[in-house]
Image (tube, rainbow, N blue to C red):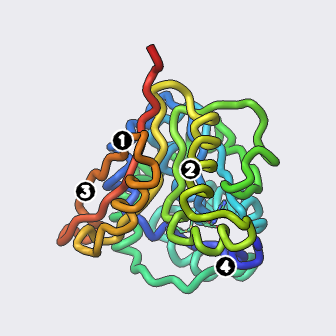
């Protein structure tokens, strides 16, 4: 199964600068996927108290270590070329320009943000766990997080359902309930990412329908070029009275 996710993304493909402020990560513990490591790096910059990078891709950890080393040893203006030309870990094709990745990543916005990340990287570790969000109980113990980020994994749901002998409704409901057990009270889980909110909203509508006991929010923000809207779908776990 994990052999479909072997290559790492050199940089995120999401507008992290647009949606991380919505998740208010300061002093929060975070579990996040993302083999580019950019979700984890930006969360660290924005003051998350604990960051666990959780990914099915076995190359993610080696890439995280390599990217950290490159950031610590390189100036901001050289980092893009260094990263996209590295040959140690196989990368997906770079689709975005230096300007685009700067827009998407707070840590690349300017020298002072980059230097702040360098400083935080010297003080704090990003933890790594290899695992599948659909069999999380095999890799995570009883820990809980304030935030969980699943990027756009749920777009690949059919691939993971195939081996389960379950209906989509059953599979999603069961997993969602499991994910909530890893979320602290008042914690937020990000379930869907929309590249362009003008695309059809079927995934949001269907997911809301299947998880109809829960209120899912669709929040929009400017895309990385500032000319259309992207979106995330989240759920906030409410304290039971
Ligand atoms: C779906 S990809 C999309 C990349 C993303 N847009 C970004 O900006 O990094 C997100 C990450 O999810 C990981 N992934 C996919 N399915 C997974 C699963 N079932 N459990 C854990 N990680 C998974 C991939 O390896 C990849 O690193």
**Cβ–Cβ under 8 Å for marks 1 and 3:** no
Which one is closest to the eye, mark 3 or mark 4?
A: 3
For disc 1, the neighbor class at 10 Å (few under 14, some 14 to 19, many from 20) is few
Label 4, on which residue?
86
SS assignment at label 3: strand
Nearest to N terminus: mark 4 or mark 2: 4
Q: Nearer the viewer, residue 222 or 208?
A: 208
Which one is closest to the eye, mark 2 or mark 3?
A: 2
SS assignment at label 4: loop
Alpha carbon distance from label 1 to label 3: 20 Å
Q: Is residue 26 left or right of residue 200?
A: right
For disc 4, the neighbor class at 10 Å (few under 14, some 14 to 19, many from 20) is some
Label 3, on which residue?
221
**Residue 195 percent across, percent down from the top left:** 35, 70
**Cβ–Cβ under 8 Å for marks 1 and 4:** no
SS assignment at label 2: helix
Which one is closest to the eye, mark 4 or mark 2?
A: 2
Residue 173: numbered disc: 2
Nearest to N terminus: mark 3 or mark 4: 4
Label 1, on which residue?
215
Alpha carbon distance from label 3 to label 4: 32 Å
Q: Nearer the viewer, residue 191 or 104?
A: 191
Q: Quadrant of ligand 1?
A: bottom right
Using the image, determine if residue 167 lies above or below residue 23. Answer: below
For disc 3, the neighbor class at 10 Å (few under 14, some 14 to 19, many from 20) is some
The quarter of the image holding the C terminus is: top left
Nearest to N terminus: mark 1 or mark 2: 2
Q: Nearer the viewer, residue 210 or 131?
A: 210
SS assignment at label 1: loop
Looking at mark 2, is its residue's CB closer than 8 Å to ligand 1?
no
């Amino acid at each position: 199964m994990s052999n479909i996710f072997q290559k790492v993304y050199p940089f995120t493909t999401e507008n992290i600068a647009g949606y991380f402020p919505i998740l208010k990560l300061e002093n929060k513990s975070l579990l996040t996927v993302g083999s580019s490591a950019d979700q984890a790096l930006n969360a660290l910059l924005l003051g998350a108290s604990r960051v666990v990078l959780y990914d099915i891709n076995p190359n993610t950890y080696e890439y995280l270590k390599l990217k950290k080393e490159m950031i610590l040893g390189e100036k901001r203006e050289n980092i893009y070329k260094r990263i996209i030309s590295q040959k140690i870990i196989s990368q997906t094709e770079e689709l975005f320009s230096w300007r685009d990745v700067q827009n998407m990543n707070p840590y690349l916005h300017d020298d002072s943000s980059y230097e702040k990340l360098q400083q935080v990287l010297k003080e704090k570790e990003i933890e790594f766990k290899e695992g599948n969000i659909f069999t999380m109980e095999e890799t995570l113990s009883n820990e809980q997080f304030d935030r969980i980020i699943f990027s756009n994994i749920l777009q690949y749901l059919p691939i993971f359902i195939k081996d389960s002998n379950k209906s989509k409704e059953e599979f999603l409901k069961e997993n969602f309930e499991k994910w909530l057990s890893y979320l602290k009270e008042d914690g937020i889980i990000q379930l869907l990412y929309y590249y362009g909110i003008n695309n059809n909203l079927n995934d949001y509508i269907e997911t809301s329908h299947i998880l109809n006991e829960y209120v899912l929010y669709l929040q929009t923000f400017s895309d990385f070029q500032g000319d259309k809207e992207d979106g995330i779908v989240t759920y906030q776990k409410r304290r039971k009275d």
